[in-house]
């Protein structure tokens, strides 16, 4: 601390040098009364045994050692040779700018002169035995925030009048004691005031020598002020022994230590800024100067008190923390010696061993060997090293995995069937496959992992069925989504060498569930991404391969993990986007969607019940009729799933809850008039926001009337708004050239009309124009249909030149929707033939299938979805390719009920069915 204080003082406080003299510079003995008081107050020694000291105010940013050396060399020569004129004779002097602090009389100051002309003039004046110059403090540049070094450089760039305007008028007559290079050592003599400029380069000015105002040495106020200055000096010296060493020898060279010199001394040793020191220099009234110096010393004393309190607080804090640390270390050592506690590494080792000991016989030998090696390595590492943390985290993951720990599975087929039926209606394919899995496990006595992929449109229950399967099998459930996943490390983990490395999702899954045979639901597997971090779809091959996942290798653990007991259930909307090798490893179970009857059961038995409980509505308060549900399904929620249906039912029950709460508030006794007004205002705002018309019936039960909200087909629009969908059938009887087809979309099946019309007729103008935002496959199908239709027309009606002489426009409605796929060929041929032969197709007929140039009908996909779409549109007769008969036979009876389905393998059969009514 003392070293720091010395450094700080060396930058701001006066410098001094010592010489062996017992008298003052003017030969005056130190015997004034003020000297006696000062020595007694400050505890000075005999002046004859001390050395002579010359102080100098620092004006440079160079080291203090250079300045002191220069001052000592200057003192080695005569300060003022005998032949030099007296200071009073110098009325014209060179002006030296002081950038940092003013120079007080009796103090040394080394400065650095960067102006070559000014330096040469100083050397020349010293040779002419006129070693005096005027030292003036530089004013701060208004509005400038530059550093002291930049300000000093700017000063040396100023010349003449500009430099004069930047100097304070009052300065000090300084004697040039030595010049070494660009360093000039000055000693102050007396105060000066600039009167006018004589020359501009270097700046030379005329000055007046200033004298102190007359004062009464015996004035009590001045004495009291000076004694207060001395007392404050004594307090300041107590805070710093460095200053005490400086001051103890100061009175050896002052001469007549009077009141003005005491004021200058106090201001010079203070750490005040240059403007406050300049104010002391400019003050000629002795009493005011003493007051200003006293203020500066008092401020200095307060600063040192604050500094001392801060240092004391920091030292106390450090000592308290050190004491607490030492006591804690001693406490740990004592507990360790008594066997009450072990060190951190031993405790960690014991924790890891406690984890593996209960299941040690179930842990594979190669894993156990790795754990033992890492535990030995942990004991040899320092707790502060980075490798220690890596090893600790690695052991934490290794010992936390459920090695050989399996949950007790449920092989009761009847109970599993009950659980699956409780959660989901329909989905017979999925339920049958799970029951088969349970039956095989019961016969074998153990179960193996499988990879099942549920594919279907959104909202059909793919994700929720996974949780039900886990409950039916009594397995722990874990779900993670891979939609948009583009980093292989999410599947296979990071290398342990990376900062923040973690295992992959499967290791995290095993640690989370605590068993080695969970049901893992991998959601949105058809939306896997691919980025700069690798191809996650390729990384999934090892995970989902029954032949490889028995030795799944995670990059972080770097030991094989057995995943053969894990049941993987994946979900996808479209299996076409799943890579072929990955799709080959999964067992696909399609979930086509729900027909109206299935949606009615789901809405009544599942959705309405759950929504009613969630909204806090009692069953006796609501009557949602079947007609309302049927209208809701057919006119608002036609998608394959039931997610939109659930949202609409929730909307209905929210409005019912609002009606019941509002009605209950109206029946409560009214309070104050202001509250009634407020309730009326709020009720009015609610009614203006949404008006719900309800039919209210009153039932009497236990002699208490209960108002029931009735929601039927008539007032359904008040709850859910106007119908979103209208009938898909645009025509009761299709016009000429219009045929209904069946299409498959990601949202399920839908009906699709193919329309053709004649645009232009003339000899040899036969052509085909297509619209409706068709894809490349449908455009090719249309060209093939045009060719096949011409061939069939030539057979059926060889005298009809329609296609040779007519330009035909074929359009598929809903032009804003992109359409593509190989199943519209037979519909396009029928539409073209209807227009060419001027015959209507059979009523309530829909068809699907692709036709080759020879007229063969090819199989298509999405039979269930297309059948559901046909039932929804009221179609009675459907034409499917013969190869799809097996798919149709697998459909549930309620889906096939009431439909007249024909299976064909040649277009001539379609021709006979479509135009039989015209025979």
Image (tube, helix red, strand yellow):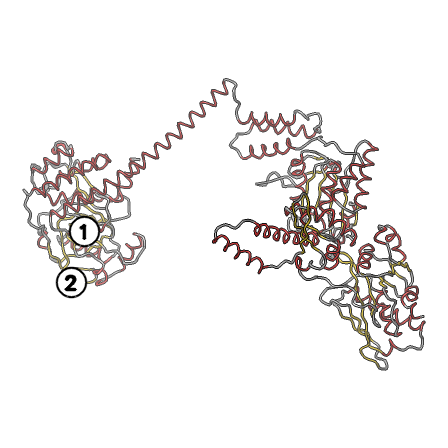
**Label of residue 279 in the image:** 1
Relative placement, left or right, of 788 versus 819 is right
Quadrant for the N terminus in the image: top left
Q: Going by the image, does 75 lie left or right of 775?
A: left
SS at mark 1 in the image = helix
Q: Which residue occupies the foreground of this view, 682 or 777?
A: 682
Q: CA distance from mark 1 to mark 2?
A: 26 Å
Q: Nearer the viewer, residue 44 or 456?
A: 456
Q: Taking the image as drawn, is residue 69 in sight?
A: no
Ranked by sequence position, the earlier of labels 1 and 2 is: 2
Q: Secondary structure at mark 2?
A: strand
Residue 205, position as x, y percentages in the image: 16, 59
- Image coordinates of residue 353 in percent, x first then y, are 62, 25
Q: Is residue 809 above or below residue 417?
A: below
Q: Nearer the viewer, residue 612 or 633?
A: 612
Horizontal and vertical percent for residue 655? 63, 54
Q: Which residue is mark 2?
A: 198
Q: Few, some or many C-alpha atoms within 10 Å of disc 2 (few <14, some 14-19, many ≥20)?
A: some
The answer to which image quadrant residue 432 occupies is top right
């Amino acid at each position: 601390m003392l070293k720091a204080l010395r450094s700080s003082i060396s930058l701001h406080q006066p410098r001094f040098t010592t010489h062996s003299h017992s008298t003052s510079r003017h030969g005056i003995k130190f015997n004034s009364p003020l000297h006696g008081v000062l020595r007694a107050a400050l505890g000075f020694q005999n002046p004859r045994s001390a050395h002579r000291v010359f102080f100098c105010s620092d004006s440079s940013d160079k080291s203090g050692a250079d300045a002191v050396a220069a001052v000592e060399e200057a003192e080695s020569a005569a300060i003022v040779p005998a032949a030099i004129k007296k200071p009073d004779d110098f009325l014209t002097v060179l002006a030296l700018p002081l950038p940092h602090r003013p120079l007080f009389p009796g103090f040394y100051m080394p400065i650095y002169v960067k102006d070559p002309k000014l330096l040469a003039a100083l050397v020349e004046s010293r040779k002419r035995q006129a070693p005096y110059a005027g030292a003036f403090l530089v004013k701060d540049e208004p509005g400038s925030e530059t550093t002291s070094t930049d300000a000093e450089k700017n000063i040396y760039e100023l010349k003449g009048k500009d430099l004069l305007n930047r100097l304070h008028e009052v300065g000090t007559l300084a004697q040039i004691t030595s010049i070494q290079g660009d360093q000039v050592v000055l000693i102050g003599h007396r105060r000066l005031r600039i009167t006018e400029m004589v020359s501009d380069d270097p700046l030379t000015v005329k000055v007046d020598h200033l004298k102190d105002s007359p004062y009464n040495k015996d004035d009590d106020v001045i004495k009291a002020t000076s004694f207060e200055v001395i007392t404050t000096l004594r307090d300041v010296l107590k805070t710093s022994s460095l200053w005490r060493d400086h001051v103890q020898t100061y009175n050896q060279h002052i001469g007549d230590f009077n009141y003005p010199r005491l004021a200058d001394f106090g201001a010079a040793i203070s750490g005040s800024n240059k403007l406050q020191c300049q104010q002391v220099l400019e003050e000629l009234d002795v009493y005011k100067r003493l007051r200003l110096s006293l203020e500066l010393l008092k401020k200095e004393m307060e600063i040192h008190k604050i500094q001392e309190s801060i240092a004391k607080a920091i030292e106390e804090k450090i000592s308290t923390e050190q004491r607490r640390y030492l006591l804690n270390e001693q406490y740990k050592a004592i507990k360790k010696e008594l066997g009450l506690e072990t060190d951190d590494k031993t405790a960690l080792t014991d924790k890891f061993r406690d984890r593996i000991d209960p299941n040690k016989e179930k842990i594979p030998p190669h894993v156990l060997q790795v754990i033992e090696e890492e535990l030995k390595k942990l004991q040899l590492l320092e707790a502060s090293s980075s490798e220690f943390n890596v090893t600790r985290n690695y052991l934490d993951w290794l010992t936390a995995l459920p090695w050989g720990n399996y949950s007790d599975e449920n092989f009761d087929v009847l109970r599993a069937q009950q659980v699956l039926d409780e959660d989901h209606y329909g989905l017979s394919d999925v339920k049958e496959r799970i029951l088969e899995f349970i039956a095989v496990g019961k016969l074998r006595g153990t179960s193996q992992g499988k990879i099942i992929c549920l594919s279907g449109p959104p909202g059909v229950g793919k994700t929720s069925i996974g949780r039900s399967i886990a409950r039916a099998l009594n397995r722990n459930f874990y779900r993670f989504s891979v939609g948009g996943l583009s980093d292989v490390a999410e599947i296979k983990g990071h290398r342990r060498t990376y900062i923040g490395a973690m295992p992959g999702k499967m290791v995290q899954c095993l640690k989370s569930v605590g068993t080695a045979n969970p049901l893992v639901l991998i959601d949105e597997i058809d939306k896997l991404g691919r980025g700069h971090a690798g191809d996650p779809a390729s990384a999934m091959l090892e995970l989902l391969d029954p032949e490889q996942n028995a030795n799944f290798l995670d990059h972080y653990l770097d030991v094989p993990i057995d995943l053969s007991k894990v049941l993987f259930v994946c979900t996808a909307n479209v299996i076409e986007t799943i890579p072929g090798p990955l799709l080959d490893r999964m067992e696909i179970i399609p979930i086509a969607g729900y027909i109206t009857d299935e949606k009615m059961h789901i809405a009544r038995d599942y959705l309405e019940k759950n929504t009613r409980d969630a909204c806090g509505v009692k069953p006796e308060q609501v009557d949602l009729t079947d007609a309302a549900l049927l209208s809701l399904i057919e006119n608002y929620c036609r998608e394959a799933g039931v997610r939109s249906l659930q949202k609409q039912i929730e909307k209905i029950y929210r409005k019912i809850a609002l009606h019941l709460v509002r009605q209950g508030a109206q029946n409560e006794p009214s309070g104050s008039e202001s509250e009634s007004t407020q309730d009326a205002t709020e009720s009015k705002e609610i009614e203006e926001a949404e008006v719900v018309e309800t039919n209210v019936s009153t039932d009497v039960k236990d002699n208490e009337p209960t108002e029931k909200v009735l929601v039927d087909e008539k007032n359904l629009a008040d709850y859910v708004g106007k119908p979103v969908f209208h009938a898909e059938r645009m025509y009761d009887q299709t016009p000429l050239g219009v045929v209904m087809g069946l299409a498959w979309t990601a949202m399920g099946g839908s009906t699709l009309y193919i329309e053709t019309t004649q645009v232009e007729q003339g000899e040899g103008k036969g052509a085909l124009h297509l619209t409706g935002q068709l894809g490349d496959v449908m455009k090719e199908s249309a060209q093939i249909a045009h060719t096949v239709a011409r061939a069939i027309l030539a057979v059926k009606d060889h005298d009809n030149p329609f296609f040779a002489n007519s330009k035909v426009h074929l359009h598929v409605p809903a032009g804003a929707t992109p359409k593509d796929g190989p199943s519209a060929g037979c519909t396009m041929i029928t539409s073209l033939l209807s227009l060419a032969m001027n015959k209507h197709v059979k009523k309530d007929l829909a068809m699907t299938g692709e036709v080759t140039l020879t007229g063969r009908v090819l199989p298509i996909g999405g039979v269930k979805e297309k059948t559901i779409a046909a039932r929804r549109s009221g179609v009675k007769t459907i034409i499917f390719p013969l190869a799809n008969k097996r798919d149709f036979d697998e459909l549930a009876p309620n889906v096939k009920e009431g439909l007249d389905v024909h299976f064909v393998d040649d277009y001539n059969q379609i021709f006979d069915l479509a135009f039989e009514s015209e025979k």
